[in-house]
Amino acid sequence: MTPAPERSSVRADAWVWAVRLAKTRSQATAACKGGRVRVNGEKAKPSTPVKVGDRVEVTVPHPNGPAALKIVEARQLLVKRVGASVAAQAYVDHSPPPPPKVERPAAIGVRDRGTGRPTKKERRELDRLRGRRS
C-alpha cells in the first residue's frame, strides 16, 4: 500500500486502477484497449508506461448521462490499490468542471403512476390545462 519509489514507471492500466479512476483492474484494462485512456495525448495500451509528471486522460462512463473526461497529472506511482485519500494525493486533477445541470420544467397534465383513474373533476382540470376546454 506504499508508493513504489524504486520504479521509474508503472503500467497504465494498473495506475488507473490504483488511483481509483476505474473500479476494477479489468475495467481499467478494457478502457485502455477501448481507447478511453490517453497518456500524454497518445492512446494508451494497458502496458503503456506512466511516469511521474505524465498527463493521463480517462473517459469515465456514467450510467445516467454523458461520459466524464478526467484529466490528471501523475504525482506518485502506485502499483497496488490504495485508500481514497492516498489515491487523491497521487495525482493532480486538471479536469474541466462538469456542465451545469439543466432542469426541465414539469410536464403539464401528466399524472403520477399509481394514482388510479382521474375523477370527473380532475379530468376537467386536466382538459383545461391541456387547452381542450375552457
Image (cartoon, grey):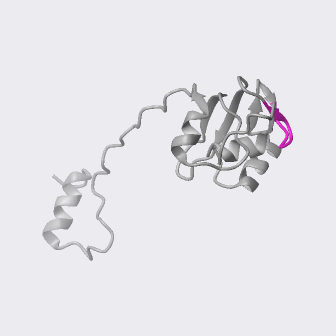
Q: Position of residue 52 (x, y in %)?
A: 72, 26
Residue nearest the observer in this picture, 131 or 15: 15
Residue 46 belongs to the span the image colors magenta: yes
Asked whether, in this view, residue 30 is left or right of residue 106, the answer is right
Asked whether, in this view, residue 2 is left or right of residue 120, the answer is right
Residue furthest to the bottom: 116
Q: Which residues are magenta?
A: 43-50
Q: Is residue 22 above or below residue 48?
A: below
Q: Residue at (36%, 43%) from the top-left corner?
A: 104
Label the magenta part by its dominant secondary structure: loop
Residue nearest the observer in this picture, 134 or 85: 85
Q: Position of residue 18 (x, y in %)?
A: 67, 46
- The image quarter in which residue 91 lies: top right
Residue 12 belongs to the span the image colors magenta: no
Asked whether, in this view, residue 42 is left or right of residue 94, the answer is right
Residue furthest to the left: 121
